[in-house]
Image (tube, rainbow, N blue to C red):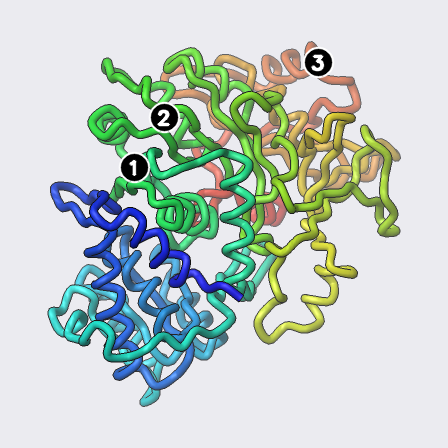
Amino acid sequence: MAYVPELFERAAKAQSSSLAIIEDTNRWTFAEIAAEVDRIAAVLKERVPGDTVGVLLLNSQKYITTMLGIWKAGKTAVPLNYLLPPAELGFIIKDSGMSGLVSSQFFNQSLVAIKPLFGDRGVILMADDPSFLSGQAGSAPATYRDPAMFLYTSGTTGRPKGVILTHDNLIANVESCQKAGDFDHRDAFLCLLPFFHTYAITGTFLLPLLNGSTMVLVDRFQPAKVLGLIQEHKISVFLAIPSMYRVLAASEGDFDVSSVRFPISGGEPLPIAIADAFEKRFNVPIFEGYGQTEAAPVVTLNTPGNRKPGTIGRALPNVEVAIWDDQNRLLPNGEVGEIMVRGRNVMQGYHHLPEETGKTITSGWLHTGDLGRMDDDGYITITGRKKDLIISAGENIYPREIEEALAQHPKVKEVAVIGVKDEVRGEVPKAFVIIREGMSADEKELRAFCREHLANYKVPKHFELVPDLPRTPTGKVLKRMLSANA
């Protein structure tokens, strides 16, 4: 079996003098990154007694070398979401069995609260301390170990679950992405998304590193800065979430982004209105994809030359996707059911949760919990989460269809739709709507617009104008919180 550090070293030798990472005014070649990884691996072997090491860092060159160093030291990495409160970080520390943590002075306040959670067994290393690079390169031979990572889910349905991903899971997904997108060392990747998220780990960390491409790091999302970096470094590939594309589409200024060939959207459904606005502004289409942490994560992707707007694309090479009904039977093309995934990229299970694992994986097939339909060309359209399906007087209503319709209204900035109880129909749609700044709209206007674009039974019975929507730390709308307060 191959391991991530081995493939990185192979790429580093092939591109040794090429730029691997650009961070502000700092530059590192592949050879320099490889040497630092060796030193960090030696320190981790010497100073961390256990097998599991957390990473609490901002996107940085040090984040990349730390992750590779953890793997080369034969340990399992646990990327920590720095937006989580200490209580949730504490749960992950305990659940993962973490024996070491790599952080920085930036997180001193959080570390004060976290340190007691380790007790006597925990070792906290500071990546910005000179001693972190005190190891002697080559003094500690690699002792690779699976799993590669425990990645904790965002907790949209309750307590976070630790997804177990092996080196082979990660490598398989990178290889599939490579085949789908035809990436090579000439590509320059803009790294916008936080590395604690699986979408970023595969798409803007492992894919460029193992491909020998240059990574340009962004510490925080600012539209003018992002567009300036694209222009300066001739960025060809970047991954973002829909809200970022919405901001970029509405940004001002004259920037040359003609180098961009592959802007990818994931993390949540991409509203057609945002995709159209971005393409109109920059004359380049967005390529929507789909994935889950449990699938390492990329499952489907639209690609240049193979794109259907409004869909999440087709299955990646070496990844199987099927649509099943509630009895685990294959549905014909065009019918809505649960999206199922099978392949080398699918997780080994949930850490310490064998029953949850058994419910989620059936004969090697991953239950995604997402509903969708596949057309005759293999393109998939998401209709919503299975748990969000609204059944009104026997009719199936998919919230995303209503959300897409309302998003076309010129005054609507964002919308989320849920089902609420109704004495007559059992359940009816309710829309939570954010109106664009400086504009006003009322329920009557929104309902009339929906009637022009939707069947009558799909028109929300209730509308609520809100200033914002509850979200996870990674930006996904928390519909369960909307349901609890509806």
- Which secondary structure lies at badge 3? helix
Does the rendering let one see residue 433? no
Mark 3 = which residue?
451
Is 160 left or right of 334, judged from the image as shown?
left
Residue 247's disc number: 2
For image coordinates 21% across by 72% down, the residue present is 137
- Which secondary structure lies at badge 2? helix
Residue 241 drawn at (x, y percent): 45, 36
Residue 99 drawn at (x, y percent): 37, 80
* Dot 2 alpha-carbon crowd within 10 angstroms: few under 14, some 14 to 19, many 20 or more: some
For image coordinates 41% across by 24% down, the residue present is 261
Mark 1 = which residue?
221
Q: CA distance from mark 3 to mark 2?
A: 29 Å
Amino acid type, label 3? Arg
**Which-is-in-front pick, marks 3 and 2?**
2
Whether the residues at callouts 1 and 2 have beta carbons within 8 Å, the answer is yes
Q: Is 120 placed above or below 212 here? A: below
**Upstream in sequence: badge 1 or badge 3:** 1
Number of callouts in the render?
3
